[in-house]
Image (tube, rainbow, N blue to C red):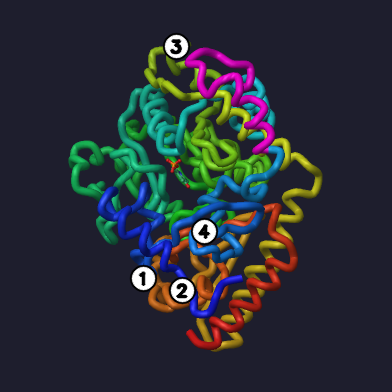
Amino acid sequence: MVATPLQTSQSEEIFATAQKLMPGGVSSPVRAFKSVGGQPLVIDRVNGAYIWDVDGNQYIDYVGTWGPAICGHAHPDVINGLKEVIDKGTSFGAPCVLENVLAEMVIDAVPSIEMVRFVNSGTEACMSVLRLMRAFTQRDKVIKFQGCYHGHGDMFLVQAGSGVATLGLPDSPGVPKNVTSNTLTAPYNDLEAVKALFAENPDQIAGVILEPVVGNSGFIPPDAGFLEGLRLLTQENGALLAFDEVMTGFRISYGGAQEKFGVTPDLTTLGKVIGGGLPVGAYGGRKDIMSMVAPAGPMYQAGTLSGNPLAMTAGIKTLELLQKPGAYEQLDKMTKKLVEGLVSIAKENGHAAYGNSISAMFGLFFTNDAVHDYEGAKKSDLQKFARYHRGMLEQGIYLAPSQFEAGFTSLAHTDEDIDQTLEAARKVMANL
Ligand SMILES: *Cc1c(COP(=O)(O)O)cnc(C)c1O
């Protein structure tokens, strides 16, 4: 489905112009191909499990617009739903009944959520939940984990320098030190480190926020007991536990990682899947905490386009599709086949490889050791990953252009798509 060698002259021309108009030519840095070399493809259209670039090449897609496309791109139910509501207008700036519908679906699905507020992105959801944790506990400090991404809010842009991981140094120019000085960090899956932070900062920690299954340093699941341990530690210390399920919500299972692992946080952030491909985020949790949010309570947070009928519709239609019996079993089985196949093909060709998946989320690292945290993820052979990425692209397989991103499958991926992907991997891994 792609020409050999890959023809991308249209992409190159459009991207050259884009670079003059927008920083780096992209609207979000993850779309650049900086860590794998080459330049991004300019996409013309998407459908089901496939994307087409402007040169007409067709690829099997494992990025899924970074998470939302769990039912496949441009699902007819979603598109037709949008067509039905769009004639009534795109945004009301006033309550609409569709907000109730999606809110009820979210509250029914996610164990921790008794009340929910819709926003427009995962970043907004995480910034709001941080403010809420601080408002509720009247404490300022927060613990996050190395390699966990919670959007680009100042307080979350903290690089976890090894050894001085708790120092809270800003990750980006423009983030003042005093803004991140209340952000404490620990290695993922390290309960002892969290215990130590609580001991060093008695009665000062508002809460702990984490990706309950990490997708933003590659795919890293929680070790047995880690989530349970955090639940206990936060309770013992009068702090709140927030699961950032922007990526895992409605992906790891219908009720998210919290349902899958049976650990209920106080607060949860959502995004990606619940927007069905439109800009949506949400945060929710215990009713007593959510009652602090304006206008019910004093914690201010607002949004001009929040809860608009188009975004709500795309979310509702997507969740309806995910309610079909067997959806997650199908995703789990297919993704396992993919990852197990990739790992064994890598090993057959003499490459160190470690892979893992839950439901429709997976990762492949070029290292033999099981990956439990960001440090472990960084041991992957990044140059090899770059060659693998390029090779797969040339075989018509579209992977995230970074080792430190999870892969995503969808209900639209067929057995043949997986077979074709493994066939491509056989060719690529033989020449890495
Ligand atoms: C994508 C992501 C975010 C940020 O969401 P945006 O909609 O890109 O702002 C936050 N947290 C996690 C875990 C994410 O994967």
Q: What's the distance in space between the residues labelled 2 and 3, CA to CA?
A: 50 Å
Q: Which residue is mark 2?
A: 390
Q: Could you tell me residue 186's position as x and y percent?
A: 37, 51
Q: Quadrant of ligand 1?
A: top left
Q: Which residue is mark 1?
A: 37
Question: Where 12 sits versus 354, above or below?
Answer: above
Q: Residue at x 21, y 42 (%)?
A: 175
Q: Which residue is mark 4?
A: 406
Seen in the image, is 233 located left or right of residue 170?
right
Looking at the rendered structure, the kind of residue marked 4 is Ala
Q: Could you tell me residue 149's position as x and y percent?
A: 41, 48
Q: What's the distance in space between the residues labelled 4 and 3, CA to CA?
A: 37 Å
Residue 178 vs residue 357, the one in the foreground: 357
Q: Which residues are magenta?
A: 78-98
| Secondary element at image label 3 | loop
- Name the N-terminal-most of marks 2 and 4: 2
Asked where in the image residue 363 lies, by quadrant, the reply is: bottom right
193 is within the stretch colored magenta: no
Q: Dot 3: few (<14), some (14–19), or many (≥20) neighbours within 10 Å?
A: few
Mark 1 touching mark 2, by CB under 8 A?
Answer: yes
| Secondary element at image label 2 | helix
Asked where in the image residue 3 lies, by quadrant, the reply is: bottom right
Q: Residue at x 23, y 47 (%)?
A: 170
Looking at the rendered structure, the kind of residue marked 1 is Gly
Q: Residue at x 60, y 48 (%)?
A: 69
